[in-house]
Amino acid sequence: LGTAAEGTPVRLPSSRINVLLVGGTGAGKSYIAGLLAEQLIDRDYSILVVDPEGDHVGLGHLPGALVVGGSGELPGIDDVLRLLHHRYASVVVDLTGLGRQASTAYQRDLFTRVEAHRHRTGLPHWVFVDEPDRLVGRDVPAPAALEPADKGYCLVTWRPQDLSSETVAAVDVVVASDSLAAEDPVVNLAAAVGGRPRAEVAELLGSIAHGQAVLARRDGAPRVCAVSVARRTTPHLRHLHKYDRHPLDREHCFHFRRSAEEPTERLAANLPELESELTRCGRDVLRHHCPRHDFSRWVADVFHDPSLARRLAHIESAVTAKSSGAAIEEARLELLGAVEERPEC
């Protein structure tokens, strides 16, 4: 994984564990997932990486690793299973050509079949899953598409609190890749897995710098430590703002309202459209949404961008239902500035 503070290597077992990677957008959790994946591939493990945002197509540079989907034709599930079984190959399934609902449906069908294939053949040895709460979340009806108790999973999420209790119980290693993860759910989870006091874990999470992470593990020594993450050998292709400009389905759009009972019939299907509507919407719209923190919650829930969400929330907090016109216009300019200045990939 990398090195501890004193420079000693920090290693993880290459089998019979489940790893949970947590962190905010752009914090490095997908980088660490790729780091683990490339080392497993190099050691001739067969892995399946399901890649909703194209973060891991760089693994295709490795011998024995194939990338399918993306801008090309997405293979059927039978074809994916055949590829996995061919000389212990590793497969990255790039789902960027699908919308969110179609992607979730494909993953559920794929993982259900993969579980049966693993029981019969033992392959793939590892399964990497982004946003696993879609498949093993607290509110996902049974039967689950994944079976974490069987081990060999690397789960990547920014909301571990949405995972089912059975999935959390099966986690052996937590790697938190930024200080934003010092929120209660991550601190509690890392402290429980690492068997260390919550205050100690919170302090450690708050102290890490860019390129570092906090490791918590049930077995081995040390149980909890800061790690300087190792360099990768394959390119990490971050699609951080894939959904900034890609239109969302109506269910996930932002719906502008003058009040709880009075919609404006205006929608924002991505961040540029949010910016456009913020420019033109009436003051009554801002008076309605800002005190409820609707803009920041939408950015956090849909775009997984906690940094921008926190900045928007700070601006929203200054607005009340009785704010003056001047205060509303000042908030409008600050909201527009926050969206316009968000970092680009």
Image: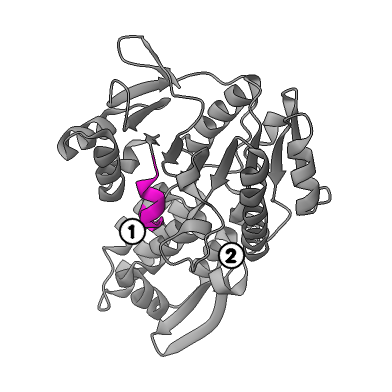
In the picture, which quadrant includes the N terminus? Answer: top left
Residue located at (50% from left, 76% from top): 255
User: What whole-number distance in Å separates the C-alpha atoms at marks 2 and 1?
Assistant: 19 Å
Q: Give me the disc on residue 273.
A: 2
Q: How crowded is mark 2: few (under 14 residues within 10 Å), some or many (20 or more)?
A: some
Image side of residue 296 versus residue 152, left or right: left
Residue 69: x and y in percent read 77, 47
Residue 70 visible at all: no
Task: Compare marks 2 and 1 and give the one earlier in the sequence.
Answer: 2
Q: Quadrant of residue 219?
A: top left
Instruction: Tally the numbered discs.
Output: 2
Whether 328 is drawn above or below 52: the answer is below
Residue 251 visible at all: yes
In the picture, which quadrant includes the C terminus? Answer: top right
View extreme (top): residue: 7
Q: What stretch is highlighted in magenta?
A: 161-171
Q: Badge 1 is on which residue?
A: 313
View extreme (bottom): residue: 261
